Amino acid sequence: MGRIIAVANQKGGVGKTTTAINLSACLAEIGQKILVIDMDPQGNTTSGFGIDKNQLTNTIYEMIIGECDLKECLLEQVIENLSILPANVNLSGAEIELIEIERREYVVKDRIEEVREQYDFVIIDCPPSLSMLTINAMTTADTVLVPIQCEYYALEGLSQLLQTIRLVKQRLNPQLEVEGVVFTMYDARTNLSLQVVENVKNNLNQNIYKTIIPRNIRLAEAPSHGKPINLYDSKSAGAESYRLLAQEVLQKN
């Protein structure tokens, strides 16, 4: 049965979508069957795999509101071993639609349960907010992976996210655990990056991945070419880092 990981941080710009795309692609590269779920109305994970999100008839939004079933919005084998449930700006309307829906916290979970055994991993890219979409991701997930940017305000908002995870665990999904924290945008040239890593390690009673994702030009360029980093520049530092992260995630399985 597939392991479901939600990639979440309500703070924007921390490398959440970059991590969702590239961790998924690197797991697929080593032969794992992957389903990526884009639950961010910005649809950046969708376009990061080279999909024109504005041309889609059916997305996860249509699935949530019952206009289509999962099979109708699933894009299969976008790259080898990897399929995606895409999103676009329509998903921003889901918050309002969900108010009327029974079991609204479990809409996505109920759909994904039907197919999860077909995949080794299901990776969910959450929106950068603690919204009903994020709650849906967390009720669906087994674990939450938290990317943290190596910058001064890294810990700000993290306690709020961990409290949300605790509340979801208490009330909606007793199985939910923190997968771990992964540091992103690490700049070896600055003392600040090093201080942030040490600060988080000292203050956070959570699993912290050994792999640290560097600040990397090729990693920043890849989405505009619609490719994950391992296909855009296989030998770059960013690609190597996400391969190492994929191995760490796999070993926890």
Image (cartoon, rainbow, N blue to C red):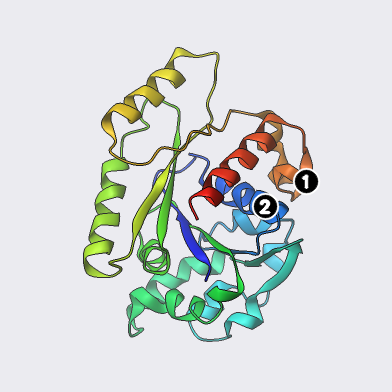
Residue 102 on image: x %, y %: 33, 85
Q: Is mark 1 on a helix, strand or loop?
A: helix
Please give the residue where the numbered disc 2 appears in the rendered image: 25
- Percent from the top left, x then y, of residue 228? 70, 47
Q: Where residue 131 sits in the image (x, y, percent)?
A: 36, 61
Would residue 213 be found to the left or right of residue 50 on screen?
left
Q: Residue at x 21, y 64 (%)?
A: 170
As drawn, 213 above or below 116: above
Q: Is residue 12 above or below residue 53?
A: above
Amino acid type, label 1 = Leu
What is the spatial separation of the Cα atoms under label 2 and label 1, in whole angstroms? 9 Å
Image point 42% across, 64% down: which residue? Answer: 141
Q: Quadrant of residue 110?
A: bottom left
Would residue 113 be seen by someone viewing this image from the given angle?
A: yes
Nearer-N-terminus badge (2/1): 2
User: Hey, what amino acid is under mark 2?
Assistant: Ala
**Do the CB atoms of the residues marked 2 and 1 lie less than 8 Å apart?**
yes
Q: Tell me where residue 30 appears, x and y as whole percent.
A: 70, 52
Where residue 231 is drawn, which disc sits there?
1
Q: Residues within 10 Å of mark 1 (few under 14, many from 20)?
A: some
